[in-house]
Amino acid sequence: METFKGIVSQFVNVRLERPSVNAPKSKVLAPGSEVEISHAIVGEEYLDSSIWYVLSNHSFVWSKSIYTTSEVPLIEKKIIVTADDIGIVEEIDVGAKIALREGWINSIAVLVNRPDDHNDSYLSDFCQSLMDFPKEDPEHSLYKTTHIGLHFTITSGEPISEPKEVQLLIDSEKKFLDFRKFNRNFEKPDYVEQVKTEFLAQYEKFKRVFGREPDHLTSHHDVLTFNHPLFSFMQNWSREKSIPLRNHRFLPRSKRFWYDTLALMNVNLPSINKMNNWESSFGPFTSECSQHTIVDHYGPIPPFGITSYEEIVSKKQKSLDNWMKDFLISKDSQREIVIHLIKSGFRSQSDFVGAYKSLRNSYPGIEIKYFDGRVAEYLSLQKNCFWNSDPWLALHVRS
């Protein structure tokens, strides 16, 4: 990785964690000292400059205190914070709207197959609520500034298509098959064609409700990374439409382990390296259709009921803090972080299971036992969003 030599021109503090005069101080550099610079980023404005250098030892110095070459690259940092699984559970959607209004998130991934919403009234009302806020500034409404993406699913709820058109994808109750029933059959041409049929139906409904193209594409349970035909379809389609596609490299190790060893033992899931090779065969994305460079889950989601929200929120804050530090010192210009949240008065996992029992039948495929984890993620964002506390690190809003 290329670095650049710099000479200190005045006494300057070396900062840790953030490019800010309020960040922890490592040491003081004297004039004439040499530093090794990785790149420059925008940080807190001090005197007449907001440009900071990221050193090769992962610390930060104010740029006006360093003589160096003009070839040091300036990397603009953009964050996409996406709330997943919007459109099915009202309390999840309420949490997302609050998070958008408060500036905790700037992106949502929408499921469009809500049960008993055949005339699109629920999703249309949700869309209208984004258009209506803030009323005093319609040109900067949440509808215009939020990344609104399609969260394609063939593993939750029921199809948008006529059941006879996707009969290989559904059970006797006309619900999508559980993701654990994915197998090698889904590589066969007739299965792939039915997946495409359903995808296009959900895509057309998205456009009908939101009145525009999706700002990005994702898939529930990451099914479009499960085999080569589905992976190829989504890669090709996103390039043709110039719509960003969530990067396949984001899968958390714990989730990958679950897929590989416990849930999908009949499927030879492709490795990340294999998917990298598949992706490279399609050629690079255009500048208008850049992938989300790196995607992370904000978590982990606890597998068992939460007994101490204070402890889990603290753990999530630490995880997010480490994520932010890593992003700032990296040469990545854009990252997405995936949020699972809900606004609820419930705290006990058993209370959630009881209150949402009907969801198991009306919309199988969203795990109720993780709803307390969603509460923890909501509370963690409510407690502190690092991009809100550092005004120079603004969320990347939709242009």
Image (cartoon, rainbow, N blue to C red):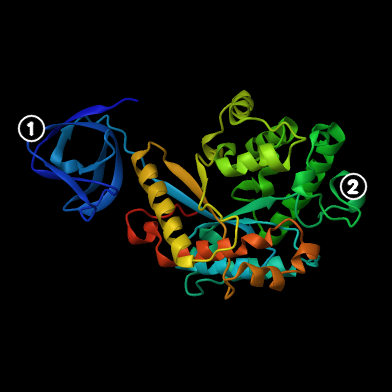
Residue 301: image quadrant is: bottom right
Q: Is residue 368 above or below residue 24?
A: below
Task: Locate the N terminus and report the quarter of the image it occupies.
Answer: top left
Q: Amino acid at mark 1?
A: Gly
Q: Amino acid at mark 2?
A: Gln
Residue annotated with mark 2: 167
Question: Left or right of 30: which side holds 383?
Answer: right
**SS of the residue under disc 1:** loop
| Nearer to us in this view, 273 or 238 | 273
Circle nearer the N terminus (1, 2): 1
Which numbered marker is on residue 32?
1
> Circle 2: is it few (<14), some (14-19), or many (20+) Cα within 10 Å?
some
| Nearer to us in this view, 300 or 388 | 300
The residue under the point 51% across, 46% down is: 296
Counting from the top left corner in percent of width and height, residue 233 is at 72, 35
**SS of the residue under disc 2:** helix
Residue 284: image quadrant is: top right
The residue under the point 63% across, 51% down is: 214
